[in-house]
Image: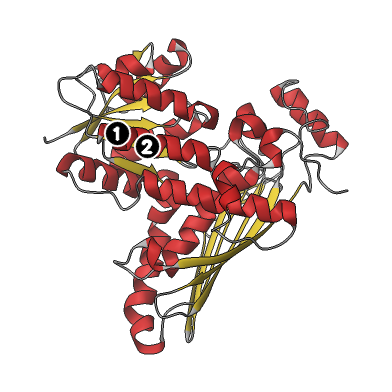
Amino acid sequence: MKTLSIGFVGAGFNTNFHLQSLLQVRDCTVGGVASRTLKSAQKSADLANSLGLGPAKAFATVEEMAADSSIDAIWINSPNDSRVAVMESIVAGNRKRNKKLLGIACEKPLARNLAEARQLVAMVEAENIPTGYLENQVFAPTVVRGKDVIWRRAVPLTGRPYLARAAEEHCGPHSPWFWQGAVQGGGVMNDMMCHSVETARFLLTEPGACRSSLRVLSVQAQIASLKWTRPQYVQELKDTYGPEVDYSKAPSEDFARCTITFEDEAGRRLIAEATTSWAFVGAGLRLSFELLGPEYSMRSNSLETGLEAFFSRRVQGESGEDLVEKQNAEQGVMPIVADEASAYGYAAENRHMVQCFLHGTTPELTFADGAEVVRLLMAAYRSAELERAVSMDDPVLEDFQPAVARGCWQPKA
């Protein structure tokens, strides 16, 4: 095959980022979109067509799209609580085809908990369909280039890195389901720590080696509600998203930090530190990464863009996110991310997945990797609840559901 026709499940903010990134990806088209409503699917299909990525059409159901022979692969971008049902529909559609799907890619996190992640892995393995785990920050140009320079120039002379830090911070999600623990599977830890722990692990892993070359010894984490359970912000959430988002009754954490201790193949201790927040008020989304070793360090900050604008008080207009995702101001000095789809890793991620599915090679990240990230997240939630470090060998993790996801978490005053 020369081109891969992609069908998207979900028509929200994330799908639009993927569509923008595909302008930089060869050998693919957008064949369709399926969403919870035909209207929203049509909106994203229209966007794909306006970008010259089509011909794309809206499908009434996921099964219908998966069964359509014009679709070669599917990207799952739907809300976390739908993942198992979506996969069941894809499997049902795939069984109606003369030739099976070439691949299924799924956005982070793979699932709300480890039990659901195992279900997804089992379903695709039974169908023998190649998979890809969509973790864009691992493909961010600054991360990839930074790792390459450190491991190629510094490590051979002075030794491997021993500490990686990764953080993602912004003022809060776009859609109501992200704020609902039962739907999303937790709060900011489930939503964004999946990025940070996997990127830190990627930076610490020797190029060409499997992620399993680093053995997890322990996970220690903390969660808190620093902003969104204050009365004025509880009301703001209700006013913005409706009564289903009520943080006076069912809050989610808006801050999380996690420390993972690894052991490499030589028995050396390595540490990954990850921090995530929905309580960060700055120019907008901030991604930061560091890698440190015996005689070197590397750092990256997505808000240090090399491009900025200044607007005086007389420049007034409607608020938006045209300069940077989660933009928090319309005046003053503001950084501009010139190409967010590329800077955040979406373009390189999709380029990789498209070529792997077209040529029948295994992506760098598969559903199995996504399940391992979920296992790390469940260990982090359990650690936060127990207020101590936990082992990845803890059998409780297999069926563990965070208190936030069960609606019974109450932050400390």
Q: Horizontal and vertical percent for residue 143?
A: 42, 62
Identify the residue at horizontal 65%, vertical 31% (top origin): 182
Viewer-proximal residue among 374 and 23: 374
Q: Quadrant of the N terminus?
A: top left
**Residue that badge 1 annotates:** 126
99 relative to 242 in the view: left or right: left
> Which quarter of the figure has residue 410?
top right
403 relative to 323 in the view: left or right: right
Q: Is residue 184 visible?
A: yes
Q: Please, is residue 156 above or below residue 341 in the view?
A: below
> What element does badge 1 sit on?
helix
Identify the residue at horizontal 63%, vertical 40% (top origin): 401
Q: Horizontal and vertical percent for residue 52?
A: 27, 27
Crowd around label 1: few <14 · some 14–19 · many ≥20 (10 Å): few
**Cβ atoms at labels 1 and 2 below 8 Å apart:** yes
Residue type at mark 2?
Answer: Ala
**Residue that badge 2 annotates:** 122
Residue type at mark 1?
Answer: Ala
Identify the residue at horizontal 85%, vertical 35% (top origin): 232
Identify the residue at horizontal 33%, vertical 84% (top origin): 156
Q: CA distance from mark 1 to mark 2?
A: 6 Å
